[in-house]
Each structure stands twice: as C-alpha cells, then as structure tokens.
C-alpha cells in the first residue's frame, strides 16, 4: 500500500466521520452541523481524489516498466 492510497483511505474515513457527526448535530438542532458537513464533504472529496491518483500512478508505473522491458528485449 503506497502513501497516496493510505492518505486517500484516511481522508475518506475522516470525511465520512465528519459527515456522520454533522448528521448527529443536525438531529440535535445545533447550528454547528453545517460546518461539520462542509468539512466532511471536502475531506471526503480530497480522499477520493487521492485514492484515484494512487490508482492512476500504479497503472502508469506498470506501463512504464512493461515498456522498458520490451525495449531491453529488442536490444
């Protein structure tokens, strides 16, 4: 597990936790729930994008390694 995937998963978990806390605060009619929901959505979005970036990097690395292997075969 690389660092981007780990950061992404942590961001997703923290974002979901903030959204759940926001829903809990909304049920108790507290005005602070709006900020908790906003922070939760932003952190979840960043975590999702970081996870997606991790997967794209992994695919890119594999394709580069395969390309180098083919070049060495041809030489």
Image (cartoon, rainbow, N blue to C red):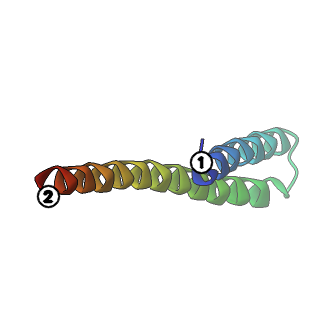
Q: Which residue is located at x 49 percent, y 52 percent?
A: 54
Say whether residue 1 is left or right of residue 64. right
Percent position (x, y) of residue 44?
A: 62, 51
- Residue at far left of view: 74
Asked if residue 20 is positioned above or below residue 68 in the image, the reply reads above
Percent position (x, y) of residue 72?
A: 21, 55
* Label 1: which secondary element: loop
Figure quadrant of residue 16: top right
- How many numbered discs sit on the rendered protein? 2
Percent position (x, y) of residue 24?
A: 82, 38
Q: Nearer the viewer, mark 1 or mark 2?
A: 2
Disc number placed over residue 2 in the picture, else none: 1
Q: Which residue is located at x 34 percent, y 55 percent?
A: 60
How far apart, in angstroms, are the residues tagged by discs 1 and 2? 32 Å
* Label 2: which secondary element: loop
Residue underneath mark 2:
75
The crowd level at tag 2 (other Cα within 10 Å; few <14, some 14-19, many 20+) is few
Which residue occupies the foreground of this view, 15 or 5? 5
Disc number placed over residue 38 in the picture, else none: none
Which residue occupies the foreground of this view, 62 or 45? 62
Quadrant containing the C terminus in the rendered view:
bottom left
């Amino acid at each position: 597990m690389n660092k981007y995937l780990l950061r992404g998963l942590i961001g997703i978990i923290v974002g979901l936790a903030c959204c759940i806390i926001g829903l809990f605060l909304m049920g108790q009619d507290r005005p602070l729930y709006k900020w908790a929901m906003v922070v939760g959505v932003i952190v979840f979005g960043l975590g999702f994008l970081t996870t997606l970036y991790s997967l794209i990097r992994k695919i890119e690395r594999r394709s580069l390694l395969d390309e180098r292997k083919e070049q060495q075969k041809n030489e």
